[in-house]
């Protein structure tokens, strides 16, 4: 399905610039132009009510055996998207497709049938588990609700198998434990096992390792990768850590203040970021290649402010108040999706306004200077055409100054 402004991974796998692309299987779950507005509680007799613009015209697609990373800072709308896809929130507008068919019905049976196929792993494993119930109770409920265990014997066998699948062994020792008796990593594994108990086709992981110690994050990520490959799960991986997105997901989608700004194959997006926001995200991530001889960073990143209020968001591209390359048109309207080649795309006027012509595409580069050198004649300030320098496999903003 060819959808304008669709923030999905490409329907083809491009092996290299010369190879023929391999078509992907049909998407299991698609979001098409989803919007979500949360009304504010206020006493107002007349006039329009204020709302929080949590997600704007966001689209994505999830494919069997592939992971899509949804990346952005706190408040960008990532969790809102996951909860709409899990049908915990109803979209203000837009369509959700499961296996090509629109998802309909809000009744108990309709939601139960949907959740049989689509499961959500929450960010905090402790708050998502009931502290008064043991592991057996948490796992037997979805087994019973979705008809995967009808007798006590089947129930026990399925629970032990689930615990072994998430590497909680010996499973017999964990089945009677309560959440407070488990470590953070063990609790998150139980939460993953609970999601798998429904035998879903889609797994939505909302920052599944952000609440865990650094020492065990990699174990949980490897567990999800193994389950994705073994079960051919379509996986949405939400994170604010763009480095883990490169490790974990085949495709990456970058969100800012409810808008999708860039997407494509993870290697392409992270090695050659095009949108200024993606460049800032990567520049802020630790990278040994950017360390100087004294062990300090070779560049100093300028302060870029905070994410804007989503009650009264900026017009056009919502990143323009923080963007080092903002132009007048950026505040007037949101740019159309521009294809950059190889499944890589961006919503940014620096690269066009919806033109799909990769052959004539030239990367916008960024110089670590605030001077007007390298700008076009008659141009000044933030409206200049930037130049590019790649350091440590990441493009840095134009007003980043080098130390020394």
Image: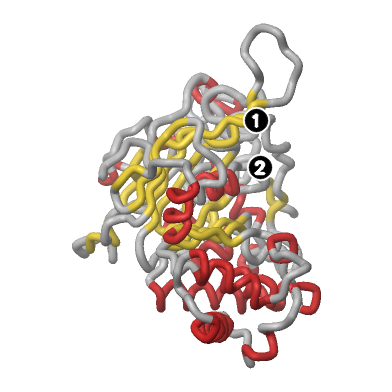
Which residue is labeled 2 in the image? 75
Q: Are marks 1 and 2 in contact (CB under 8 Å)?
A: yes
Residue 26, percent from left and from top: 27, 57
Residue 275, percent from left and from top: 50, 43
Residue situated furthest right in the rendering = 180
The C terminus appears in which quarter of the rendering? bottom right
Query: Is 195 rendered above or below residue 299?
Result: below
Q: Nearer the viewer, residue 356 or 162?
A: 162
- To which quarter of the image does residue 277 belong? top right
Looking at the image, residue 19 sits to the left or right of residue 189; the answer is left
Residue 100, percent from left and from top: 29, 49
| Crowd rating for badge 2 (residues with CA inside 10 Å; few <14, some 14–19, many 20+) | some
Task: Note whether residue 384 is visible.
Answer: yes
The N terminus appears in which quarter of the rendering? top left
| Alpha-carbon span between mark 1 and mark 2 | 9 Å
Q: Nearer the viewer, residue 349 or 238?
A: 238
Q: Nearer the viewer, residue 18 or 377?
A: 18
Earlier-in-chain disc, 1 versus 2:
2
- To which quarter of the image does residue 171 belong? bottom right
Determine the residue positioned at 74% across, 73% down.
184
Query: Is 373 rendered above or below residue 169?
Result: above
Which residue is labeled 1 in the image? 310
Residue situated furthest left in the rendering = 20
């Amino acid at each position: 399905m060819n959808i304008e402004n669709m923030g999905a991974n490409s329907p083809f796998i491009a092996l290299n610039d010369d190879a023929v692309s391999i078509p992907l299987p049909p998407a299991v779950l698609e979001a098409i132009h989803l919007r979500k507005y949360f009304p504010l509680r206020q006493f107002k007799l007349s006039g329009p009510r204020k709302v929080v613009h949590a997600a704007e015209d966001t689209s994505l697609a999830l494919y069997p055996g592939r992971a899509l990373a949804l990346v952005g800072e706190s408040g960008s709308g990532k969790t809102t998207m996951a909860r709409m896809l899990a049908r915990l929130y109803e979209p203000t507008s837009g369509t959700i497709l499961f296996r090509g068919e629109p998802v309909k019905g809000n009744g108990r049976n309709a939601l139960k049938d949907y959740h049989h196929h689509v499961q959500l792993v929450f960010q905090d494993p402790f708050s998502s588990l009931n502290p008064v119930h043991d592991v057996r109770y948490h796992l037997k409920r979805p087994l019973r609700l979705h008809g995967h265990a009808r007798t006590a014997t089947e129930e026990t066998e399925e629970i032990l198998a689930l615990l072994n699948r998430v590497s909680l062994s010996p499973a017999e020792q964990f089945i009677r434990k309560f959440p407070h008796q488990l470590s953070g990593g063990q609790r998150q594994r139980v939460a993953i096992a609970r999601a798998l108990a429904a035998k879903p086709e889609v797994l939505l992981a909302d920052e599944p390792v952000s609440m865990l110690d650094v020492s065990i994050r990699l174990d949980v990520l490897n567990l999800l990768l193994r389950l994705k490959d073994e079960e051919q799960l379509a996986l949405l991986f939400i994170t604010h850590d763009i480095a883990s997105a490169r490790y974990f997901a085949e495709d990456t989608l970058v969100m800012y203040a409810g808008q999708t700004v860039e997407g494509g194959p993870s290697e392409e997006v992270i090695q050659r970021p095009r949108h200024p926001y993606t460049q800032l995200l990567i520049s802020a991530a630790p990278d040994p290649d950017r360390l100087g001889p004294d062990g300090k960073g070779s560049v100093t990143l300028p302060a870029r402010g905070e994410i804007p209020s989503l009650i009264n968001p900026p017009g056009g591209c919502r990143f323009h108040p923080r963007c080092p390359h903002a132009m007048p048109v950026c505040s007037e309207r949101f740019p159309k999706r521009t294809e950059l080649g190889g499944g890589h795309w961006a919503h940014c006027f620096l690269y066009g306004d919806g033109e799909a012509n990769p052959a004539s595409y030239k990367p916008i580069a960024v110089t670590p200077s605030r001077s007007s050198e390298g700008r076009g004649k008659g141009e000044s300030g933030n409206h200049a055409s930037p130049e590019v320098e790649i350091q440590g496999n990441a493009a840095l903003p134009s007003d980043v100054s080098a130390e020394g």
